[in-house]
Image (cartoon, rainbow, N blue to C red):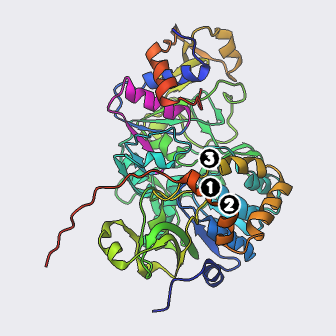
Amino acid sequence: MPEKLMSMRDAIAAHVHDGDSVAIEGFTACICFAAAHEIIRQARRDLTLCRMTPDLIYDQMIAAGCARKMVFSYLGNPGVGSLHCVRRAVEKDVPGPLELEEYSHFGMVGRYLAGAYHLPFFPLRSYSGSDLPAVNPRIRSVDSPYGDETIAVVPPLNPDVAILHAQRADTEGNTQLWGLLGVQKEVAFAARHVIVVVEEIVETDIIRSDPNRTVIPSLLVDALVREPYGTHPSYVQGYYDRDNTFYLAWDEISRDEAATQAWLDEWVYGVPDRAAYLEKLGPETWERLAPGEAMAASVNYGAYQ
Amino acid sequence: MTHCTPSEMMIVAAARALAGVRTVFVGVGLPNSACNLARRTVAPHLELIYESGVYGAQPARLPLSIGDPTLISGATSVCSMADLFGLYLQGGRVEVAFLGGAQIDRFGNLNTTVIGDWQQPKVRLPGSGGACEIAINAQQIFVIMRLKRRAFVDQLHFLTSPGHLGGGGERAVLRLPGSGPQLVVTDKCVFRFDEATGEMVLHSLHPGVELAEVQEAVGWELKIAPHLGETESPTDEDLRLLREELDPQGLYR
């Protein structure tokens, strides 16, 4: 089997191409900013960015001119306010126009599920009475073949590439995730190619000691990248907290187009890779964001010989 | 009673409405404080559910977002978003859900999508998130919003999340599983909804608020309950819990 473990630079170069549909998922937690910054540095263009909550990560990619279109369900800086770069693109076409394809959360979850299950659509109890179907013709409805009911449906979403961050994997890419699970598993099964990014590479024995925690099997993984602190300013459960001061700071920076570009110059284009970004942040960041300890009790799977 | 802020009044009024409730779908900010206060007072068995996939959260600090890691540690269960929306919400396990928005109309329909036209918006708002399916599937919806003329409008610019739609039982015609909005808590008053027409009715004024203030802030001809009451003030214990234990930094005061 080809070696999967590689640098972020090589993983993005190999698997993310101009015009691709890209899903960097992770609901509040495990948002892989390290991958987004590398995509910006490699100047990918015309991407269709898929993500339930575009968050700061797509705000930055849109400001950098990577995207043509966005497929999403909630456009906010979580707990803070607006995504100003997305709003500039939508309201003023700055730095360029951005096409929107808008769903609700369950609609996005359903799209990934249909994609992962190889189904033509996913039915859900949503959208009835809402104006969303009027602005998104891909939200449709079907008559139930088992009664007189009509139900909303959404089409499958199979991104060209999914980029998913987690706590740990073995060198084959068998990946364990805990805390918020988001749609990481569904996206991994739906995507044509998967890049997994982890905080730690561990021995296979550790993965196999707790198989219930393995969310993404090696089978799905094309590239594996070890990138500690790779989700900053997002967080990884048990490893570091969200850097809320940055989420607040971005609210200020991103209001101004020039300040946004200056930030990208300094923190994305101005560093060659994630290691340099971490060095620039300094060790006090990690002291500030270190959580206390809350260990799970271990369980006995049993040895059946 | 000790003097309380408008936010504290909103939190306490919402918390009291949760008496006896078992499961509540929470957002950050005032609803989070209301649910935590309810758990300490009128609803000790309340399970807090967050759309991020957390069931039975017992946050050790005030969560800064619905995905805050403090919601995970010590929770009853953490599941995928597919399970959260499919099994918990659509499965009918959510008794009460809190929603808000930039605009609400007399039937409790909510706009969180755009001000202006969707194609060329004047202001692009966050969008639905889970609100559309929450509004449809939760057994009851409680709304928390500050009372302002630009928010309580005659015509929404966009209907993101259905309330009672056009009123008069339209939800039942569309077979929406939940019963829709039952309560709107504002900084001035509490509204409930007329069962037959589905229209918002002024139910009580907060202490010291004049009826005219409310009328001026609502963009339609306001219906008033025949026995308009005064919202019950927070107790000293409510305020002590809020100020000393639930939100000592006063983030949502």
- Dot 1 lies on which element? helix
Marks 2 and 1 sit apart, C-alpha to C-alpha, by 7 Å
Residue A280 image point, x, y percent: 70, 64
**Which of the chains bears the disc numbered 3?**
A
Q: Nearer the viewer, mark 1 or mark 3?
A: 1
Q: Which residue is mark 3?
A: A131
- Total labels drawn: 3
Residue holding disc 2:
A281
Q: Would you say the residues marked 1 and 3 are in contact, meaning their CB atoms lie under 8 Å apart?
A: no
Image position of A293 with respect to B191: above or below: below
Q: Position of residue A63 (x, y in %)?
A: 77, 61
- The structure residue drawn at horizontal position 61% and vertical position 48%, both measured from the top left corner, is A78
How many residues crowd around disc 3 within 10 Å: few (fewer than 14), some, or many (20 or more)? some
**Residue linked to disc 1:** A285
Amino acid type, mark 3: Asp
Q: Quadrant of the C terminus of chain B?
A: top right
| Relative image position of residue A106 (x, y in whole percent) | 49, 54
| Residue type, mark 2 in image | Leu
Q: Could you tell me which residue is drawn at 57 percent across and 75 percent down?
A: A161
Q: Read off the magenta span.
A: B29-52
Q: Is residue B177 visible?
A: no
Q: CA distance from mark 2 to mark 3?
A: 44 Å
Depth check, front residue: B158 or A42: A42
Q: Are marks 1 and 3 on the same chain?
A: yes
